[in-house]
Image: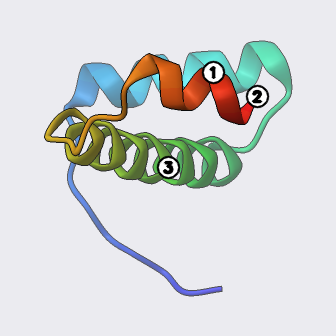
């Protein structure tokens, strides 16, 4: 494990602390999971954007491969 240091809004920190307290979680685990999920979503978005640019395949070709 490594340590990162970042500043966040005080209200966001209060919300994080409250959530962790209510659910019996550690802030470190919540932040780590949130970052991992954000990165996965960002990669998915990049893939979606690439696929939107084409090349496109005709439905008939796709259907024949099913």
Work out which quarter of the rendered image holds the C terminus and state it. Answer: top right
Q: 47 and 17: which one is in front?
A: 47
Residue 8, above or below 7: above
Q: Mark 1 near mark 2, Cβ–Cβ under 8 Å? A: yes
Tag on residue 40? 3
Please, which colouring scheme is shown?
rainbow
Residue at disc 2, secondary structure? loop
Find residue 15 and report its horizontal and vertical position in percent: 45, 17
* Residue 6 left/right relative to 64: left
Residue where numbered disc 1 is placed: 63
Find residue 35 and report its horizontal and vertical position in percent: 47, 51
The tag earlier along the polypeptide, 3 or 2, is 3
Tag on residue 9? none
Cα separation, mark 3 vs mark 1, equals 30 Å
Residue at the (79%, 35%) spot, across then down: 25
Residue 44, above or below 61: below
* Residue 41 left/right relative to 7: right
Residue at the (54%, 47%) spot, across then down: 31
Tag on residue 66? 2
Residue 17: image quadrant is top right
Cα separation, mark 3 vs mark 2, equals 28 Å
Nearest-to-viewer mark from 3 and 2: 2
Residue at the (39%, 75%) spot, across then down: 4
Work out which quarter of the rendered image holds the N terminus and state it. Answer: bottom right
Cα separation, mark 1 vs mark 2, equals 5 Å
Residue at disc 3, secondary structure? helix
* Residue 21 left/right relative to 12: right
Residue at the (59%, 55%) spot, across then down: 32
Q: 42 and 9: which one is in front?
A: 42
Nearest-to-viewer mark from 3 and 1: 1
Find residue 21 and report its horizontal and vertical position in percent: 73, 22
Residue at disc 1, secondary structure? helix
């Amino acid at each position: 494990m490594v340590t990162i240091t970042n500043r966040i809004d005080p209200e966001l920190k209060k919300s994080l602390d409250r959530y962790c307290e209510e659910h019996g979680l550690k802030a470190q685990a919540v932040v780590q999971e949130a970052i991992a999920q954000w990165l996965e979503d960002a990669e998915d978005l990049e893939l979606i954007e690439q696929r939107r640019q084409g090349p496109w395949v005709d439905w008939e070709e796709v259907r024949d491969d099913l």
